Amino acid sequence: MSQDLLHRYLFDNADVRGEMVQLEQSYQEILAAHDYPVALQKLIGQLMAATSLLTATIKFTGDISVQLQGDGPVSLAVINGSNLQALRGIARWKGELADDASLADLMGKGIMAITLTPDEGERYQGIVSLEHSDLAACLEEYFNQSEQLPTVIRLFADGKQAAGMLLQVLPTENSENEEFDHLTALTQTIKQEELFTLSAEDILHRLYHQEEVLIFDPINVTFKCGCSKESSAKAIATLQQAEVEAILAEEGDIKMDCEYCPAIYTFDSIDIAAIYAGNMGSDQQQ
């Protein structure tokens, strides 16, 4: 895969839509900020692919968050995305994680919360328990509960690449959809290696060469943190000036690490004085 792309397609002879996402660079950029264990790298990759697929289903300008919370060694794993397919994410864990740890091993008893935040309109959140064996099955349960649309999801990640596919029945008056069952059987045959090494066109031809498939232009998927020195300065401004100046006197400067990327923003005495004078407008990374 040379690019991080989301592909959307429709089946002309069935009331079914599909999506496919292949990620590499954006996946590596999210992993770069933390030394995640192998099992957590895989979970984050699957979560990225899932969020991209879900982001493509929203019909508004805004953001989506897919968050896992549990009482296991991984307490939090979250990916935020926008309708422009800009993703960022983070996870928190403790202790040793086996490379082949399952979703239950990682999260323990937990939930998945999917939050839609449109730029205009009301915020919506759907929650499902993490009772299934993998993330894809939990997402299928979410669609079954929230939209009552038959949905099939496939997710893969190996620490280097991540990919996913989504197949979903379009809302119609027809309650039976034999075509969906047929297309589901074809989609379930996809292998991780194929999604990691073949082009989207080759994959769709291999899976659905006897079907009439309408493919839309691909959409770039990117990592976008959104941090800045200005936003870090605003965070500092929420603290008591005396407290900040005490840290400054002890350390010589104040460093703010971004949770989502490797960026570090450094503030010296002049910067701190400008913050509390209301003159801090710099947006340069140091």
Image (tube, rainbow, N blue to C red):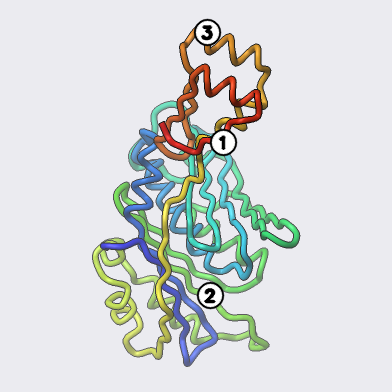
Residue under the image location 27 percent in, 67 percent down: 194
Closest to the observer: 220 or 104?
220
Q: CA distance from mark 3 to mark 2?
A: 59 Å
Residue type highlighted by circle 2: Gln
Instruction: Determine which residue is flagged by label 2.
Output: 168
* Vertical side of 69 occupied by 248: above or below: above
* Vertical side of 104 occupied by 157: above or below: below
Residue under the image location 66 percent in, 64 percent down: 145
**Placement of the N terminus among the 4 image quadrants:** bottom left
Residue 50 image position (x, y, % from top left)? 48, 58
Instruction: Determine which residue is flagged by label 3.
Output: 249
Secondary structure beneath label 2: strand
Residue 281 image position (x, y, % from top left)? 56, 36
| Residue that extends furthest to the top in the rendered view of this protein | 250
Residue under the image location 48 percent in, 80 percent down: 181
Closest to the observer: 218 or 177?
218
Q: Crowdedness of circle 2 by 10 Å Cα count: few (<14), some, many (20+)?
A: many
Closest to the observer: 57 or 275?
275
Closest to the observer: 185 or 246?
246
Q: CA distance from mark 3 to mark 1?
A: 23 Å
Q: Nearer the viewer, mark 3 or mark 1?
A: 1
Residue type highlighted by circle 1: Gly
Residue 55 image position (x, y, % from top left)? 54, 63
Q: Crowdedness of circle 3 by 10 Å Cα count: few (<14), some, many (20+)?
A: few
Q: CA distance from mark 1 to mark 2?
A: 47 Å
**Image quadrant in which you'd find residue 83:** bottom right
